[in-house]
Image (tube, helix red, strand yellow):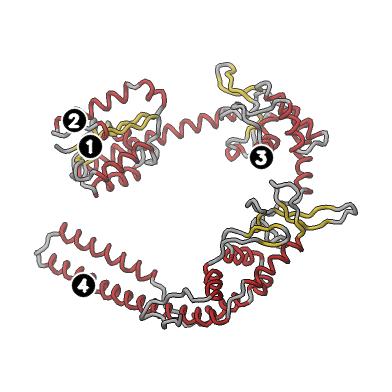
Amino acid sequence: MPIAVLYNRVSTVRQAEKGTSLDFQEKEGRKLATTAGETVLPESIFIDRGESAKTIDRTELRKMMQYVEAHKHEVSTVYFYDFSRFTRDSADFHVLRAFFKRLGVRCVSVTQPTDDTPEGRFFENMYVGMAQLDNELRALKSRNGMVSAVGEGRYISRPTLGFIRVRVLNKATVAPHEPYAGHIRHGFELVEHGYTQTEALAVLTGEGFTRLNGKSVCIKYWNKILHNPVYKGYIRAFAKEYGKPVKGTFEPIVSEELFDRVQAILARQNKCAPKYQKQRADFPLRRFATCPKGHRFTASLSKGRSGQRYPFYRCNICPKSNVAKAEIEKAFMTILEQSCMDEGLAVLLRIAIEENWKAAGTANEKRRQELEKQILSLKGEQEHFARKNFAQVLDDDTTRDLVAKTKKAITECEQELVLIPRTSDEIGHVVEYGINIMRNPRVAWEAFSLTHKLRFQSLLFPEGLPFADGQFGTAKKALILQTKTAHLVGESHLVTPRGVEPRLQA
């Protein structure tokens, strides 16, 4: 007996908790499936609780699609109560319909039945269009209502920290929420009296200032609070409609004068504050070198007693881990000098790369010719189908399907053809450039820009380098450095496929 899949949905959590709508949808879907001689399994019922039909990115809808695809030979029909339960977007509906049609599965509305005829498809589009229109009208009406509320000076968005939702004359707005409002007011006053944002937040945290969920307020969130005009009684929402923030009718937490003075102070602090750079040209080993425990080094300029600044690398976790920039970079130069490629290995590597490149080029050219021949053959098939259709041997629908399949195959071949790399005559120069770098990596590293230094050192030592007692320790090296080590120790471990590179002497 074929399997019927039921997809039920309610748009609000309250409807989901009440359950009556979902129960009724399932009951009606089961009734129609039974009439059609189909069976409904417990695992073939999918329910989205409190999710909107504006998008197809719904939890249970995705699971239902995966289930149908996995059981496409068993599932015959997907039932939903009406098209607004299934989707409220016409583009999404056509995506879903094409997906199930490809699997040979019908999509059936319990209350808005249609069939696979021109008239039936017209009514499907009409039902989905009506659902989309209703959804868009609701959204427009809701937005217009919010714009109007803001124009009246009412804050109707989700209250930010320090405010609580209230109703005044039976209309929604906000009011200060203690003790959070008091903490925020005190924070503005602290900044006005010379405290930095961090210092002010530390004082407030000591006084018990937290978020509504009890978690501490981070500096990033505190910075947003200090810059948000809602605390002086202005609403930023729908500023495009009104041209500027709207003065609210609710009670502010701080005065306009205090808020504006704090903005001027913050602007001066930000102007004077140094910009943090994750990577700097004068500290190329930052976040690359590590302490013995594996923590990545950071770096900074430390001020001495004389006022002069000295560059240091250090670990923020381990105590007394400062290392002078000159010391650690000198040790890194030593590592690079020890990583020079052996001349004999350079010769073998050049031969291996060039031979492999030639072999790859031959294989690519062969595949290119195969694809070009296949494209010509497929185009010939298209012409053959057209002639058969003209001679009335093939009907229009069959011809259309066959031409579409060959067109898809041609597109796939052309896409693969574009991706096949062409053999370049410049390969010799590229190989020589790379080998010259590996012959003397220290000279190359010193000449590189910061970006290329970071890439090069990460290529040679992908897991970074541990530094301790004035020197770098053992770390995982790139394959090219491992190969060099093996070559210098004794027997070569380079294995060359027969027919591609020349046999290497052991």
Q: Quadrant of residue 16?
A: top left
Marks 2 and 1 close (CB-CB < 8 Å) = yes
Q: Which residue is drawn at 76% across and 27% down?
A: 186
**Front in this rendered view, residue 404 or 114:** 404
Residue ID for mark 3: 220
Viewer can see residue 228: no
Regarding mark 4 in the picture, which secondary structure is present there?
Answer: helix
- Earlier in the chain: of badge 3 and badge 4, it is 3
**Mark 2 and mark 3: Cα distance apart in space:** 56 Å
Quarter of the figure that contains the N terminus = top left
Marks 3 and 4 close (CB-CB < 8 Å) = no
* Residue 107 locus on image (x, y percent): 24, 40
Disc 4 crowd rating (10 Å Cα; few below 14, some 14-19, many 20+) is few
- Earlier in the chain: of badge 4 and badge 2, it is 2
The label shown at residue 32 is 2
**Front in this rendered view, residue 438 or 21:** 438
| Relative height, residue 418 to residue 350 (above, below) | above
Disc 3 crowd rating (10 Å Cα; few below 14, some 14-19, many 20+) is few
Residue ID for mark 4: 380
At label 1, the amino acid type is Val
**Mark 3 and mark 4: Cα distance apart in space:** 65 Å
